[in-house]
Structure formats: structure tokens, C-alpha cells
């Protein structure tokens, strides 16, 4: 259990700046999700916390102590990798016991701790199997177990669910969250999946091109995105961006108007548009419309609403309180 | 999906495999058959007549102290060559694996010795260790060590081992490096986070995962030391002094072509044939269950 603080973290590979200065204070027991598109530097940031990448500039503190120059093993962390990184030549038991054996933990205690973790992760029947004899979900659990048994201060997750199929991903997501709640270990979780970020995070760091665009609780970020990038990245289907001059009362400097699909309504008056295609998803329907000014928008409506036919001319309306204006540089107006 | 070409007749496919079959027959089956046949006879020195002796040549060999000594020499020589060439290659491969910049140049330079023919390599080492003008001999002399592999059997053995292992390091290096690079980086990183420092990681993760490569190289290197080191030994020591470096394959040559005892030489070839066969079976058996994890 520990706090983690990142102060002005920068990373350059040769002449390429990858991370341009990240500051965040993570509280004890907090679940932080670092989310962003591929290439935004999120994995690099996590690997710097793990000690697998050097820190070019800035300071990383775990439990108050500066760890920049410490080896990974001296940081009291555990990491779950995207490809699980299990030791292929060892049994599940040995995989989980590896760290403890190296630490010189007595045999009886190793067995106890591994069995405890195995019970928690429903792996008790598989302890003698090799990783290749396990399914993807089970391998994922072994990787988790390996992290748990060492009782580290910080868990680091590097896209741990991206190799699983969609259904298993949802299930494991829930399990990870419950496990983290139960153990109360400070966690950093990297993902490109905004749904994972929304559901898992106490707070999330939305990264874009090596910068933290916004740090905050998921619903706060959703309700109040600070940049056009965050507004477009968080939320599915993404926020609609329209030219701001659609609105007569657009503030000075605003270039883009953002409205979330659920805040758009098809109405009898308002901005004219043409229905391109409707996707009925069961509980809800996504109506894609094109605007005469150019560009497309998505309206998310209840399945009980009438389904407009393709090519129908419609009108869109929204509430003034649901609008977001962004400047030319992508920031909130 | 594998796409196979199918032929209608028998003649075209036969024609296509014929070169391979002919080469195998002419350069393998015929000489091997000749060796087996000749091992049962003792020819006269002029090759005009042959006398049937059955397994007499083998009986004589197995009772011969020189031949048994040659077995021991071969064992020492091949174990030493294998250990030296694989050990050095593994060390260099581990270093190269950690190298980020300039690894291409480093690798290329390390591969060069493989291109040097064994006989040429032998001559190179012979010059360096020449008892009168060798540069290394001279430096050893400065250090107060009197190097003379022409008289000292142990020094001769050391020299042929080094010369044979040297050219082999490149080959082993390539395989070890490929083996090391096939180990997922994240597995090594996971071990580092689990608390394993370099040597522990090497012992518990890298070495076990490298074992298929190691075993393959072990067999290949032993076969090499048995058979392909002839050129090195012939140029450096000629089997001497006092047969100290006469390995089995060299004895085949010296008994057969120098001493003109063709029957015994053929019998020795047959024994070697059996040894290679055994090694090959071992290797194939291993390849079938290649990956041990």
C-alpha cells in the first residue's frame, strides 16, 4: 500500500520526445487508469514507473521515496503484462512462487500464499499445469496471481485484457476491479479501451501525444472534457463535432461545437439534416445523419422512438447546457 | 493451406529427384559400402590381392592400445572443443543480445571466422604458435613460458582445441543469439520485477528456455569435432607428438593412406559410421520432441 507521485515526468528516445511532462499524485489504494490511443506514451509511462525504462527528466516517488534510480525489483511493485509473460517452462505454482522463492520466503509460507491466491483466482485445480495447457483467461489469472502473491505496494497493469475475447474481457474487467477493491492495492492500469477506463478507474489520466490532457474521475471527465481530444476519445459512440457557427451564440474564438449523441434529438424544428443510416442495437438506436454544412453526426435514441428511414430530411436539436465549445487549439473555450 | 504440385507420370518426378539420388549414391552409399566391404579384408601393400579376414580387422583394432588411446584422445578433444566453442559463443551472444547500438557490425565481425576454411585456420594458428617465429610463442617466452607444442602433447592438444573451436564460435554464436532473441522480452522483464537479478534470471529463465538450442548445438558440435577437424589437426600437428592429437578420424587417414593398412582403415571408418549413426538418431529423436516446455 503506497502513494505514487509523478513529478514532471519526461521521456525521450534519442531525439524523439515521447512524454512531455506528466504530473500526478496517486493516493494510497487508488485505481488509476491511463488511457489513450496507441502511441500516446501510456505504456512508456507505466514502464518508467516499473523501472523498465529510464526516466529522462522528472521524479517518480513510491511511498514517498524517490525510485528513479532503483531497479525494478527494488521498487516493491508487481506488473501484469499484455501477453502475460508467464515462464513457459514452469508450472502455474512455480510461476506464482518464483518471486517469493527469490526473496527467500520459507517454503511453507510460499505454499500458503500461492494456494491462497490460487483459491482467490479459481486456479487451485491448475497448479501443476504448464502455461501452454491453459486457456487465455486462465493465463491471465496466473499473471494476476503472480502479482498478488508478492503483496506489492503497487500493481501495474499493461493492457492486460487486450488478448482476450470480448466476453471474457468484460468478465475479467469485473474480476480485476473486485480484486483490487478487496486487496486495496494502489494500481496503475494502462488501456486503449475507454470502456475499460470508465468502468475500472477511480481516476483516469487521458493521454494524447505524450501529454496528460485531463486527469479526473471517469464521470467528471465524461461530463466535463477539457479538450476536444478527450471529448472525442471518451464516450462511445464518440461526441459529435460540428462547426461552431451553427450556433448563433457561439463564444469568441470557438471553432468547434461538441454535443454527445445522447444529447441530440430528432425534432420537428432546429438544425436541418439528412438521415444516412440507422443502426438498431436493441435497447437503443444510433441514427447517423449528414449535415448540409458537411460532416456527420450520430443521434443516440431510445429503441421505442420511431426509426427514421434513410434519406429522410430531419431536424436536430439539443439543449444549450449540453454544448461544449472548443477553440482552434483543441482546448475548451 | 499447403499447395502441392502433382505429376501425372512417374518419369518427370523421378528425373527431378535423380540428381539428389545420384549424389547420395555416388558420394555416400558407394564409399560407405566399399568401406564395409574392405573392412573384411586385408589387402597386400600394392593393392593386387585381398585376403578375407572376416571381423579380424575389428578384433585387432579393439585389442590395439593405440586405437583405444585414440578413442580417449577423441573424447577429450571433442568435449574440449564443444565446451570451449559453445561457452565462448554463449558468452558473446549474451553480450550481443544486450547490445542496442552497433549490434549489426558486432554480429557481422563475429560471423567472419566461420568463413575461414579449417585448414587455413589451422595454418593461421600454427603461425601464431610457431615454436620459433610465432608471435604468441614469443610473448609467452617474454612471460617466462617456454611454448613447444611440437614436443609437448598437452600443449599440442590445447592448440588444436583452440584452433578448432575458434572457427566454430561463429556458428554457435548465431544459434545462441537467435535463441536468446526468441525469448520474449516481457518474460525477462517479468523476472526482473519478480526480483531476479541478471545471474538468477539467466540461470532460472534464460538457460532453461535456451535448452533446445543448446542441445542441438551440443550434438552438432560433437559431430563437428569428430569429423570436420581433420584439416586443423593435419596442418598443425599431423596427429603428433606421439599420437597425442590423433583423433579417430585422423587415425583413419594416417593408418590408411600413410601406413597403407587399408583394411584396418576401412574398419575404423565403419566404426565411425556407427558412431555418427548413433549421434544422428539421438538428434532426430530429440528434434521430434524439440521444445521441452
Image (cartoon, coloured by chain):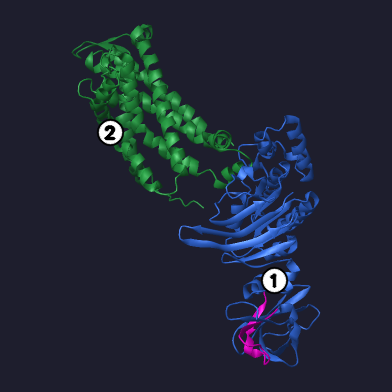
Chain colours: A blue, B green
Foreground of the two, B273 or A38:
A38
Dividing the picture into quarters, in which one does residue B275 lie? Answer: top left
Q: Position of residue A89 (x, y in %)?
A: 61, 37
Q: Chain of mark 2?
A: B
Dividing the picture into quarters, in which one does residue A298 lie? Answer: bottom right
Q: Position of residue B128 (x, y in %)?
A: 25, 27
Examine the rendering and report whether any part of residue A161 can be seen.
Answer: no
Q: Position of residue B6 (x, y in %)?
A: 43, 50
Query: For the C terminus of chain A, which image quadrant?
Result: bottom right
Q: Which residue is disc 2 drawn over?
A: B117
- Tell whether position A255 is magenta: yes
* Marks 2 and 1 on same chain: no
Q: Residue at x 42, y 25 (%)?
A: B277
Residue bounds of the magenta highlight: A236-259
Examine the rendering and report whether any part of residue A187 can be seen.
Answer: yes
Looking at the rendered structure, the secondary structure element under dot 1 is: loop
Q: Which residue is disc 1 drawn over?
A: A236
- Disc 2: CA contacts within 10 A as few (<14), some (14-19) or many (>=20): few
Foreground of the two, A108 or B225:
A108
Query: Is A109 left or right of B156, judged from the image as shown?
Result: right
Amino acid at each position: 500500500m503506497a502513494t505514487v507521485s509523478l513529478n514532471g515526468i519526461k521521456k525521450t528516445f534519442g531525439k524523439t520526445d515521447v512524454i512531455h511532462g506528466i504530473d500526478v499524485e496517486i493516493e494510497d489504494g487508488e485505481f488509476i487508469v491511463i488511457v489513450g490511443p496507441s502511441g500516446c506514451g501510456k505504456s512508456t509511462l507505466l514502464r518508467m514507473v516499473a523501472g523498465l525504462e529510464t526516466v529522462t527528466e522528472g521524479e517518480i516517488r513510491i511511498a514517498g521515496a524517490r525510485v528513479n534510480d532503483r531497479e525494478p525489483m527494488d521498487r516493491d511493485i508487481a506488473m501484469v503484462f499484455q501477453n502475460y509473460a508467464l515462464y513457459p517452462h514452469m508450472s502455474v505454482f512455480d510461476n506464482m512462487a518464483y518471486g517469493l522463492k527469490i526473496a527467500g520466503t520459507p517454503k511453507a509460507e510460499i505454499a500458503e500464499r500461492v494456494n491462497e491466491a490460487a483459491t482467490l483466482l479459481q486456479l487451485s485445480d491448475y497448479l501443476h499445469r504448464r502455461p501452454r495447457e491453459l486457456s487465455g483467461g486462465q493465463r491471465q489469472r496466473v499473471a494476476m496471481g503472480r502479482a498478488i502473491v508478492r503483496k506489492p505496494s503497487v500493481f501495474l497493469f499493461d493492457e492486460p485484457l487486450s488478448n482476450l475475447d470480448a466476453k471474457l474481457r468484460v468478465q475479467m474487467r469485473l474480476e480485476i476491479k473486485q480484486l483490487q477493491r478487496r486487496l486495496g492495492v494502489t494500481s496503475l492500469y494502462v488501456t486503449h479501451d475507454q470502456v475499460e477506463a470508465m468502468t475500472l478507474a477511480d481516476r483516469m489520466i487521458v493521454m494524447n501525444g505524450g501529454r496528460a490532457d485531463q486527469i479526473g474521475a471517469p464521470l467528471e471527465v465524461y461530463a466535463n472534457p477539457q479538450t476536444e481530444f478527450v471529448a472525442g476519445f471518451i464516450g462511445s459512440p464518440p461526441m459529435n463535432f460540428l462547426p461552431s457557427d451553427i450556433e448563433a451564440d457561439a463564444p469568441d474564438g470557438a471553432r468547434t461545437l461538441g454535443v454527445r449523441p445522447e444529447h441530440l434529438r430528432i425534432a420537428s424544428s432546429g438544425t436541418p439534416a439528412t438521415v444516412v443510416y440507422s443502426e438498431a442495437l436493441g435497447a437503443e438506436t444510433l441514427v447517423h445523419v449528414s449535415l448540409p454544412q458537411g460532416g456527420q453526426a450520430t443521434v443516440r435514441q431510445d429503441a421505442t422512438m420511431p426509426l427514421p428511414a434513410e434519406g429522410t430530411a430531419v431536424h436536430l436539436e439539443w439543449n444549450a447546457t449540453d454544448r461544449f465549445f472548443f477553440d482552434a487549439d483543441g482546448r475548451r473555450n | 493451406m499447403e499447395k502441392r504440385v502433382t505429376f501425372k507420370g512417374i518419369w518427370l518426378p523421378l528425373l527431378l529427384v535423380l540428381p539428389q539420388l545420384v549424389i547420395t549414391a555416388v558420394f555416400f552409399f558407394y564409399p560407405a559400402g566399399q568401406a564395409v566391404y574392405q573392412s573384411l579384408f586385408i589387402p597386400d601393400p600394392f593393392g593386387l590381392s585381398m585376403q578375407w579376414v572376416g571381423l579380424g580387422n575389428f578384433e585387432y583394432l579393439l585389442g590395439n592400445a593405440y586405437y583405444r588411446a585414440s578413442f580417449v584422445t577423441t573424447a577429450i578433444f571433442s568435449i574440449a572443443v564443444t565446451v570451449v566453442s559453445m561457452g565462448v559463443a554463449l558468452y558473446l551472444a549474451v553480450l550481443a543480445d544486450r547490445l542496442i547500438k552497433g549490434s549489426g557490425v558486432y554480429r557481422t565481425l563475429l560471423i567472419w571466422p566461420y568463413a575461414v576454411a579449417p585448414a587455413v585456420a589451422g595454418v593461421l594458428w600454427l603461425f601464431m604458435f610457431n615454436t620459433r617465429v610465432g608471435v604468441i610463442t614469443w610473448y609467452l617466452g617474454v612471460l617466462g613460458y617456454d611454448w613447444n607444442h611440437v614436443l609437448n602433447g598437452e600443449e599440442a592438444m590445447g592448440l588444436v582445441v583452440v584452433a578448432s573451436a575458434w572457427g566454430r564460435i561463429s556458428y554457435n554464436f548465431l544459434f545462441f543469439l537467435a535463441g536468446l532473441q526468441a525469448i520474449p522480452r516481457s518474460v525477462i522483464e517479468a523476472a526482473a520485477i519478480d526480483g531476479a537479478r541478471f545471474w538468477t534470471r539467466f540461470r532460472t529463465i534464460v538457460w532453461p528456455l535456451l535448452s533446445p538450442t543448446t542441445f542441438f548445438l551440443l550434438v552438432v558440435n560433437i559431430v563437428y569435432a569428430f569429423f570436420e577437424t581433420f584439416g586443423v589437426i593435419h596442418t598443425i600437428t599431423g596427429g603428433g607428438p606421439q599420437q597425442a592429437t590423433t583423433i579417430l578420424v585422423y587415425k583413419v587417414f594416417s593408418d590408411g593412406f600413410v601406413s597403407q593398412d587399408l583394411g584396418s582403415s576401412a574398419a575404423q571408418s565403419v566404426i565411425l559410421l556407427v558412431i555418427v549413426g548413433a549421434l544422428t538418431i539421438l538428434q532426430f529423436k530429440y528434434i521430434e520432441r524439440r521444445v521441452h516446455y
